[in-house]
Amino acid sequence: MAPVPPGTRFLASFNRDQWYRAFTFALTFLLYTSFHLSRKPIMHNSPPGTTQPHDLPCGIIGERLPIRLYLTVGMLTSGLFTCLFGLGYVYDIHCLGFYIFVQVANGLVQTTGWPSVVTCIGNWFGKGRRGLIMGLWNSHTSVGNILGSLIAGYYVSSNWGLSFIVPGVIIAAMGVICFLFLIERKLVRKHDALVRYNSRYDNSPVMLTPASLSRSWDTELLLGQESIGVCVPVQQVVVVKSEAEPSAISFMGALRIPGVVEFSLCLLFAKLVSYTFLFWLPIYITKAAHLDAKKAGDLSTLFDVGGIVGGILAGVISDKMGKRATTCAVMLLLAAPTLYGFSMMSQFGLGPTIGMLLVCGGLVNGPYALITTAVSADLGTHKSLKGNARALSTVTAIIDGTGSVGAAVGPLLAGLLSSQGWDQVFYMLMTADFLALLLLLRLVMKELCSHRKRPGVSVE
């Protein structure tokens, strides 16, 4: 018999659960890449700070609806409104009310994205290497920004309507793919007495004690009514006695989770800095490096490249140390002087500008990426929830929704301060970084004083 090719043998070594993990990782990566790709034309063609997605209301709704359907509807409607904005050029629409309505409506439906994909990916991956995995996964924001910039830059001078229509079609198509292929996974708490069968070894039942049940989680794949059963267990379990499934967490209940308020307010200032760069960086490079608009737009993508590296490094370091808040605090502390260095070095030519763009991108986006992914997932499954698995989407929405306030305010402040000189803008950004650092000090002290070395958010 012919030997099995090594590549086939390698692929066959993965079980179904591992394939589902890899597939969900790749699919959710592409789904949120399309969200950011569709936002970039707004940034190129609209005044900075006009409309930012605010995730809070839709995140709370998303906790109570099937993620696949909820995300699909959000992506299809976002594609529709993005295309409508571009069709304003095609049909020569000059009504300001039309563009305001479309942009506000698009901002609303865009909020379905982040809580949904974080909940989905958070349920598939545990805490052990969550920082690394989500650091890699979160690079979709930068990839989407880069692709969106290239698409918008290509059409903005000749036919700006297509810079909206093309991304709108892409996100709508990804919405259809989401509906057809996204596999949900739900965390399920084991109640009272539960017998687990260890089918891998001898099928002998292991009784979990009542104390361990409060910390024990199982998982179910939600494959829909067309499957043999509505839920297919990943591990064979027999429930001897169970309680009713806990209801979704309330807004105030989510706020009472230790660390949610501090990380939310920290993200407000971290996102203020990140989005100010996102909106104003091409304009600043045009003035400081004396480049045309297209070259400045292409050069500004290096900030996102640095952000990819920074997000991954933040995840790896926080996994290794088991200290999310400390990792964010150190990067914020280094970011402030780096921002001042960028304001100085960018005046000395292309080489220094490229170098400082990469460094600034890593230090600015590293904490932002860590808080919106691994930290949100950790807090959404915090031990204080006592097994209630229906909190991740709400917690994610609160954290990222608070950050969206900073994303709206930052570019607006930059527009007001830039008239007095770019130095004022950079002073504002450095102040925001220091405020973000101050908001994490309590959590940092808890982590440094704790002698327990475990991954995740070390807050009691």
Image: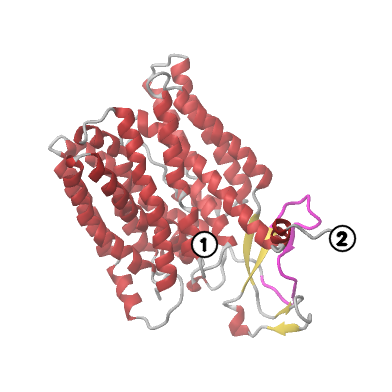
* Identity of the residue drawn at 26% across and 34% down: 283
Q: Which residues are magenta?
A: 222-243
- The amino acid type of the residue labelled 1 equals Ile
Q: Report which quarter residue 207 is drawn in.
A: bottom right
| Residue at the outermost top position | 92
Residue 254, given in percent of the width and then of the height, sits at 45, 63
Q: Is residue 408 above or below residue 127?
A: above
Q: Is residue 75 visible?
A: yes
Q: Which mark is residue 249?
A: 1
Name which of mark 1 and mark 2 comes first in the sequence: 2
Q: Is residue 354 above or below residue 230?
A: above
* Identity of the residue drawn at 20% across and 39% down: 349
Q: Is residue 257 visible?
A: no
Quarter of the figure that contains the C terminus: bottom left
SS type, badge 2: loop
Q: Is residue 235 magenta?
A: yes
Nearer to us in this view, 98 or 306: 306
Nearer to us in this view, 317 or 90: 317
